[in-house]
Image (tube, helix red, strand yellow):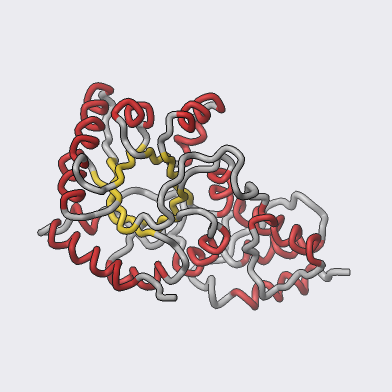
Amino acid sequence: MTDTTTLARDIERAHADKFSAFAPLPAPAPESDAPVYRAALAACSTLGFIAQDAQVLAHAWQARWERTGSNAPDLWPSVAQDFGLQPRPHATPFAACPQQLGLYAVLPDAAWVGRMARAGVPTVQLRFKSDDATAIAREVRAAVEAVAGTPALLFINDHWREATTAGAYGAHLGQEDLDALSAGEVDELRASGLRLGVSTHGYAEMLRADAVQPSYIALGAVFPTTLKRMATAPQGIARLCAYAALLQGYPTVAIGGIGAEQFGDVLDTGVGSIAVVRALVAAQDPDAEAARLLQAMAASVPRG
C-alpha cells in the first residue's frame, strides 16, 4: 500500500533541484482517491506546476503505476501511453513537416518574410496582426510570393483560410484559436493539405494539441520575453527537456526569449527547432544576424 505523504515528499526531493525556479502552488481539488495520483498531485503542485498541468502529471504517474507496478519517485513521467497521447502512427494526422525545422523566424509582415527567406532562414512564419480582412488576405498572398524561389517553408499565423487560398506551406494556431475551431473546421483544415503547428505552454495544452494530431508542436515560452504578455511563467530548460521527452515523436519548436548563446542548451533538450522573433526584427543588421544565428544553430546541433 502506498503512503501518499511519503511518496509526495520523495517526488519533491527527487526533482526539487531541477524545478527550483518555480514557487510552490496550492494543489487543486483531487479528481481521484488513488494514492499514487494524490501523492503526485501534491508533489507537482509543490514543484510549481499550475493546476491543470499538475492534474495531467498526477494522472500520468497513476497510469504508470497501474501499467508497471512502480511509482518510481525519481523517474519523471515521459511515456506517451501514460499521458493518453494518440497512438502513433496517427490515424488522421495533418500533413507531415520535417522533424527539424531549423531556425524558425516569426515575422510581422511579408517584406520581413521575404528578407529572411532570402537570407537563408529555413522556416518562416507570417504573424500579421490586423482586423482588416482585405489587408490580411493581401499580406498572406504577398508572403507566399515572397518565399517563391527560396527553399523556405512558410507558415501563416492564425489566418488558415487565407493560407489555404494563397498556397502557403502551413498554418500555425495558438490554443485559443485552436479551441475556437469546430470539429468540421479542423477536418477542413486537415483536408486542405496545410501543415499545422500548435502553440503550447505546458502539459495540458500539449494534450490538447495532440488531440488534433498536428504537424509540429511549439513549446514555450522558454525564457522571459517582452514581445507579448504570457499567461504562464517562462518554462525554462528543465521543463522543456521533460516536454521534449514526452513529445519525441513530434517535430518540436522551442520559442520565447531564446538567444544564440542559449541554442546549445535548448537543442540539448531534444527539441528539434528554435523560433526567434526579437533577435531578428530588433537587430541593427537583420541579414548579418540571421547568418550569425544560422551558424550558431549549426554549431549547437547535438552530435550522435
Q: Is residue 131 left or right of residue 25?
A: left
Residue for point 30% across, 58% down: 103
Q: Nearer the viewer, residue 219 or 303?
A: 303
Q: Is residue 211 left or right of residue 234?
A: right
State the image quarter where residue 82 is shown: bottom right
Q: Position of residue 17 (x, y in %)?
A: 55, 77
Q: Nearer the viewer, residue 267 or 219?
A: 267
Can residue 228 be seen by looking at this rendering? Answer: yes
Residue for point 54% across, 47% down: 205
Q: Total number of numbered labels? A: 0
Quarter of the C terminus within the rendering: bottom left
Q: Position of residue 41 (x, y in %)?
A: 69, 60
Residue for point 19% across, 43% down: 149
Q: Position of residue 191 (x, y in %)?
A: 48, 29
The vertical placement of 260 against 287, above or below, is below
Q: Position of residue 29 (x, y in %)?
A: 71, 51
Residue for point 15% across, 41% down: 111
Identity of the residue furthest to the top in this view: 134
Quarter of the N terminus within the rendering: bottom right
Identity of the residue furthest to the right in this view: 1
Can residue 220 be seen by looking at this rendering? Answer: no
Q: Nearer the viewer, residue 217 or 29?
A: 217
The vertical placement of 210 against 183, above or below, is below
The vertical placement of 121 against 96, above or below, is below
Q: Nearer the viewer, residue 125 or 174?
A: 125
State the image quarter where residue 168 is shown: top left
